[in-house]
Amino acid sequence: QVELAESGGGLVQYGGSLRLSCAFYGNLFSQYNMAWYRQSPGKERELVAIITPGSSTNYGDAVKGRFTISRDNGRSMVYLQMNSLKPEDTAVYYCNADYRPSRTNTLNYWGQGTQVTVSS
């Protein structure tokens, strides 16, 4: 069983920065793809950024060049550095862990989310 705990959300002004953290409680952290998603009212949850066990990264188009995802396998942590924040970045940000030990077995977990609000 895995539990994820996000932190670091809050209120920030346009153009400001925040760093989100996600603590992974469980085993085999280094085997998981870790990702950040976000959801704002009335919209579907969207992928913000993903980092593989080998630390390859990919980003949603809306955040490329502004956000950076990273992981610390020794501490079982994943981070999202968010710079040049815009009001449209306002959302609840969720941490996700995904691991597929076999073709028929997928382990996928979500955190409770942390609110990010960007004022204009």
Image (cartoon, rainbow, N blue to C red):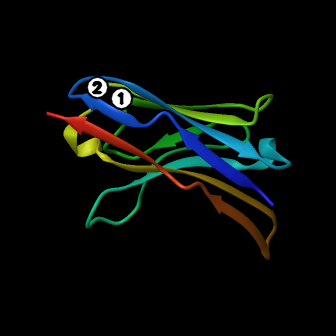
Image coordinates of residue 114 in percent, x first then y, are 46, 46
| Residue drawn at x 73%, y 49% as measured from the top left | 32
Image coordinates of residue 66 in percent, x first then y, are 36, 29
2 or 1: tag closer to the N-terminus: 1
| Relative depth, front residue between 61 and 25 | 25
Above/below status of 36 relative to 85: below
Locate residue 110 relative to residue 26 in the image: left or right. left
Amino acid under disc 2 = Ser
| Residue drawn at x 27%, y 62% as measured from the top left | 41
Q: How many marks?
A: 2
Q: Quadrant of residue 83?
A: top left
Q: Quadrant of the N terminus?
A: bottom right
Asked whether residue 55 is in view, the answer is: no
Image coordinates of residue 20 in percent, x first then y, are 50, 34
| Residue drawn at x 57%, y 48% as measured from the top left | 35
Question: Callout 1: helix, strand or loop?
Answer: loop
Quick check: marks 2 and 1 in contact, CB under 8 Å?
Answer: yes
Locate residue 18 relative to residue 31 in the image: left or right. left
Amino acid under disc 1 = Arg
| Relative depth, front residue between 30 and 113 | 113
| Residue drawn at x 67%, y 40% as measured from the top left | 23
Locate residue 95 relative to residue 37 in the image: left or right. right
Give the farthest residue toward the left: 120
Check residue 84 in the rendering and tell me which mark sits there, or answer none.
2
The residue pinned by badge 1 equals 66
Locate residue 61 relative to residue 2 in the image: left or right. left
Q: Residues within 10 Å of mark 2 (few under 14, many from 20)?
A: some
Mark 2 and mark 1: Cα distance apart in space? 6 Å
Q: Quadrant of residue 21?
A: top right
